[in-house]
Image (cartoon, helix red, strand yellow):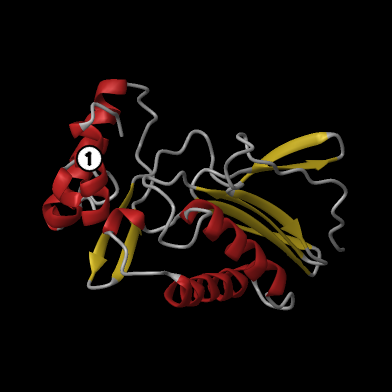
Amino acid sequence: MHLDLIQSLSIAGDSSKANDDRAGAGHACAWVIDGATDLGEPGLLGNRGGAAWIAAEADRAFAAAPEDGSIEQTCRTVFERVAAAFAEQRTRTPESWELPSASFLAVSIAENVIDCAWLGDCAALLIRDGQATRIGPQRDLLIDVHSHYDRDDMVITMSPPLDTTSGDVTTITQALADRFARNIAAHPADWHMMQPQWVADLSQERRAKLAGELSTGGTS
C-alpha cells in the first residue's frame, strides 16, 4: 500500500498575506498543517509572520523525514527540525506570546496499517467502500491543553478528555473551569502568555508604535 497525492490546493484567504497552511504527501506519509494566526506584526521570523513560517518549515520537515519509521518517529524528527530552524532563524529573543504554533494531522502507512497523529483541531476523512470515517480529534471529545514555560522551553500538557456524557452544559463548563484554575494556580506567571492584553506584555517597539498612533488619533 502507498499514498498518491491526487489534488491539492492551499491559498491564503487574503492575497496580501502569506499563506499559513500547508499540505503534502510522500510515498508512505501525508500531512496537513494549519498555522495559528499571529498575535503581532511580522518581524521575529522575517516578513511572513510566525504562522506562515512554521507551516512552511513543518511542511519541509515532513517531506524530508525518513519514510521507514513510525508516525511517532516522523513527528519527533519534524519537531526537532522545526525547533532547530527556529533557534537559527529568529531575529531576536521572542516575547512569550510571539512563539509560532500550528495544528497538524499526519498519517503514515506501514504494513498495510494506517497510523495517525495530530495536534489541535486538524482532522481528515478516510473514505473506504463508500463509507467515510473521521480520523484525528473527535468532535465529541473535550480536552483541555495547558502550556507554561520551563526557562526557555514551552511545556504543553494535554489532560484526559472531560466526561461530557451528562450533556449538562453548566456541569461540563464548571469541570473545565476547575481544570483551568488548577493549571493557572500551578503556573500563575504564564496564564496570559498567549494573550498580550497588557501594555507590559508588548515589546518596546510595539509600545512605542502604539503610543505614537494614540498621540495622533490613530488606531492600532
**Residue 22 vs residue 174: left or right?**
right
Mark 1: give few (<14), some (14-19) or many (20+) Cα within 10 Å: some
> Which residue is rendered at x = 25% and y = 60% of the image?
148
Q: In the rendered view, tell whether residue 151 sits above or below residue 197.
A: below
**Residue 179 vs residue 46: left or right?**
left
Q: In the depicted view, which residue is nearer to us: 43 or 30?
A: 43
> Which residue is rendered at x = 48% and y = 77% of the image?
84
* Residue 158 percent coordinates (x, y): 36, 54
**Residue 93 vs residue 182: left or right?**
right
Residue type at numbered disc 1: Gly
Q: Farthest residue toward the front?
A: 216
**Can see residue 147?**
no
Q: Which quadrant is the C terminus positioned in?
A: top left
Query: Where, by quadrant of the figure, is residue 180 drawn?
Result: top left
Q: In the depicted view, which residue is nearer to us: 31 or 215?
A: 215
**Regarding mark 1 in the picture, which secondary structure is present there?**
helix
Q: In the rendered view, tell whether residue 18 sits above or below residue 215.
A: below
> Which residue is rendered at x = 59% and y = 63% of the image?
58
* Residue 132 percent coordinates (x, y): 75, 36
Q: In the rendered view, tell whether residue 165 sits above or below residue 110.
A: above
Q: In the depicted view, which residue is nearer to us: 7 or 140?
A: 7
**Can see residue 64?**
yes
Q: Which quadrant is the N terminus positioned in?
A: bottom right
Count of picture labels: 1
* Residue 199 percent coordinates (x, y): 16, 44
Query: Where, by quadrant of the figure, is residue 107 drawn?
Result: bottom right
* Residue 78 percent coordinates (x, y): 57, 71
**Residue 200 vs residue 73: left or right?**
left
Please name the residue that numbered disc 1 is placed on. Answer: 212
